[in-house]
Structure formats: structure tokens, C-alpha cells
Image (cartoon, rainbow, N blue to C red):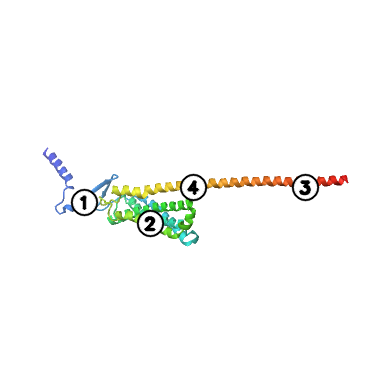
């Protein structure tokens, strides 16, 4: 009986021994070696950074590659072809540049983060750069779309003013500079640590005030403005189409009236000619 009790005690001691610190190890090393995280039923040790890779995430690398190719073609086309160098196309080039930077500075980091099972091993500086580039380039894309919609609104609603002022390339440069200045100003706080990351191997938005404010002023307000502008543009185009149809109908009715009038005049001339011929024939028969 004493032997069974001693065996139970020895087994309990053996079970406890891996948890107890060894005499020759420092306390900090024991805490670091025992720091683990259970994520998706997989045990991840941050000391050796043993992470289950996600190979399917590499397929997502095709998205930034195609994005870089497409936007590069847009930029080269406008640069090489002088007939494409207009105010609207300059704004489109700015939009393509923003999307190109999204692919280079954001999408590849996102693919790495997905591939590494959402464990960030590149340090806090690159994390802040990644999030700041995401905010800046995404804001620039949306504001460029807003600038294009404003340009189309002026061209359709006020064509004479657009021909005098809006078609000037300096206005396009001013619009592009304003768009990028606002975008960089929004992203600067994130790049310099406004987004406080609590966990060491995490890289995500953690500042709720900044998330709500940037979402409202960098996404929802420009989207609502674009919807309102394109609604006005659609209404103006419908009005122009109706006016064009009325002019066509007026021209058609005028043409038909002219044809009827010409037919009546021709009939009158023919009647006068027939009358003259009859009178001549009657006079000849009498004499």
C-alpha cells in the first residue's frame, strides 16, 4: 500500500516538474519559453515563431500582380499618347497611381500576413508603414474618384465654364495635389504610432476613434457626394436627350409641312399649266 501511494506521489511530481523553473535558468527565459497562444486549435510558440503556413494565401499574390500590370498600362498609355493627355485622363492617371501603390505597399503585406496565419513577424515599424500606406492609398483612390466625378459634373452641367477654366491642365494638377495632400495628412498619424498595437505579433487597427473618423470622412462622405453628383449628371443628360428628341420632332414636322406645301404648290402650277393649254386648244378649235 505504501508502494502504491509512493508511485502516485512520484507520478504527480513528474507531471509538475516541466512547469517548475530549473535552477540554472533565469526567470525571464522561463516566462518566454512558456508563453504560448492557442489559435485555431494550433499551438504557436512565439519563442521559435513556429507557425502553420497557409499555402493557399499565395494564390492571392496574383491580385497585386494583375493590379500592377493593369494600372501600369494605364499610366504608360496616357504618357505615350498625346491625344489622351486631358484633364480627366490626368485624374485617371492619379487614380491608377494610387491603385498601383495599394498593390505595392499594401496587398503584398496583406498576402504575407494571410500566409503567415495572421502572425506579424516584421516588427512594429513596418506594421505602422503598412497600415499608414493602406490608409493613404485607399483615401487617395476614393478622393480621386470624387475629383473625377466633380470634373464630369462641371463638364456636363456648365460646359461653357468648363471650356474656359475646367479644361486647363493646371486645374488638374491642383486637384491631384489636393487629393494627395489630404490623403497623406490622414495617414501620417497612423504611420507615427497613433494606432497602438497591444500584442507583439499583431498588426491591425486598434484605435476605434481613428477608425470611425477616417471611415466617415475618407469613405462615406466622398461616396455620398459621388452618388449625388452622378445623380445630377444623369438627370442633366436625360434633360438633354429629351430636348434633342423635341428638336428632332420639330425638324421632322417642319420637313413634312414643307413637303406638303411643295406638293400643293406643284399641283397648283400643274393646274395653271393645264388651264392654259385648254384655253389655247379651245381658241384654235374655234378659229
Q: Quadrant of the N terminus?
A: top left
**Is 198 left, or right, of 168 in this rendering?**
left
Asked if labels 3 and 1 touch by Cβ distance under 8 angstroms, the answer is no
* Residue lying farthest to the top in this orientation: 1
Q: Which mark is residue 178?
A: 2
Decide which of 63, 177 is in the foreground and name it: 177
Spatial distance from mark 2 to mark 1, Cα to Cα?
51 Å
Q: Please give the name of the residue rendered at 38% of the width and 56% of the height, measured from the top-left corner.
A: 178
Is the residue marked by circle 1 packed among few (<14), some (14-19), or many (20+) residues within 10 Å? few
Decide which of 147, 142 is in the foreground and name it: 147
Q: Which residue is mark 4?
A: 236
Nearer mark to the viewer, of 1 and 3: 3
Nearer mark to the viewer, of 2 and 1: 2
Q: Which residue is mark 3?
A: 273
Nearer mark to the viewer, of 1 and 4: 4
> Which of the two discs, 2 and 1, labels the residue nearer the N terminus?
1
Kind of element beneath mark 1: helix
Kind of element beneath mark 2: helix
Q: Which residue is mark 1?
A: 33
Amino acid at each position: 500500500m505504501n508502494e502504491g501511494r509512493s508511485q502516485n506521489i512520484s507520478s504527480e511530481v513528474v507531471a509538475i516538474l516541466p512547469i517548475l523553473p530549473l535552477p540554472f535558468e533565469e526567470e525571464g527565459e522561463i516566462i518566454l519559453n512558456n508563453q504560448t497562444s492557442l489559435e485555431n486549435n494550433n499551438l504557436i510558440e512565439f519563442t521559435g515563431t513556429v507557425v502553420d503556413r497557409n499555402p493557399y494565401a499565395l494564390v492571392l499574390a496574383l491580385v497585386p500582380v494583375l493590379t500592377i500590370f493593369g494600372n501600369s498600362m494605364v499610366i504608360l498609355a496616357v504618357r505615350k499618347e498625346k491625344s489622351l493627355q486631358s484633364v480627366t485622363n490626368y485624374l485617371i492617371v492619379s487614380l491608377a497611381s494610387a491603385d498601383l501603390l495599394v498593390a505595392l505597399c499594401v496587398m503584398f503585406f496583406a498576402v504575407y500576413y494571410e500566409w503567415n496565419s495572421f502572425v506579424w513577424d516584421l516588427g512594429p515599424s513596418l506594421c505602422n508603414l503598412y497600415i499608414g500606406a493602406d490608409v493613404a492609398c485607399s483615401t487617395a483612390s476614393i478622393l480621386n474618384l470624387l475629383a473625377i466625378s466633380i470634373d464630369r459634373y462641371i463638364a456636363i452641367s456648365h460646359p461653357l465654364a468648363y471650356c474656359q477654366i475646367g479644361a486647363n491642365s493646371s486645374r488638374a494638377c491642383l486637384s491631384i495635389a489636393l487629393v494627395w495632400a489630404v490623403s497623406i495628412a490622414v495617414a501620417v498619424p497612423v504611420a507615427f504610432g497613433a494606432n497602438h498595437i497591444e500584442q507583439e505579433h499583431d498588426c491591425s487597427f486598434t484605435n476605434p476613434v481613428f477608425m470611425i473618423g477616417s471611415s466617415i470622412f475618407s469613405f462615406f462622405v466622398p461616396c455620398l457626394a459621388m452618388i449625388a453628383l452622378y445623380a445630377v449628371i444623369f438627370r442633366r443628360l436625360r434633360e438633354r436627350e429629351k430636348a434633342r428628341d423635341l428638336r428632332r420632332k420639330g425638324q421632322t414636322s417642319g420637313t413634312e409641312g414643307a413637303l406638303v406645301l411643295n406638293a400643293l404648290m406643284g399641283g397648283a402650277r400643274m393646274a395653271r399649266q393645264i388651264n392654259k393649254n385648254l384655253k389655247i386648244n379651245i381658241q384654235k378649235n374655234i378659229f
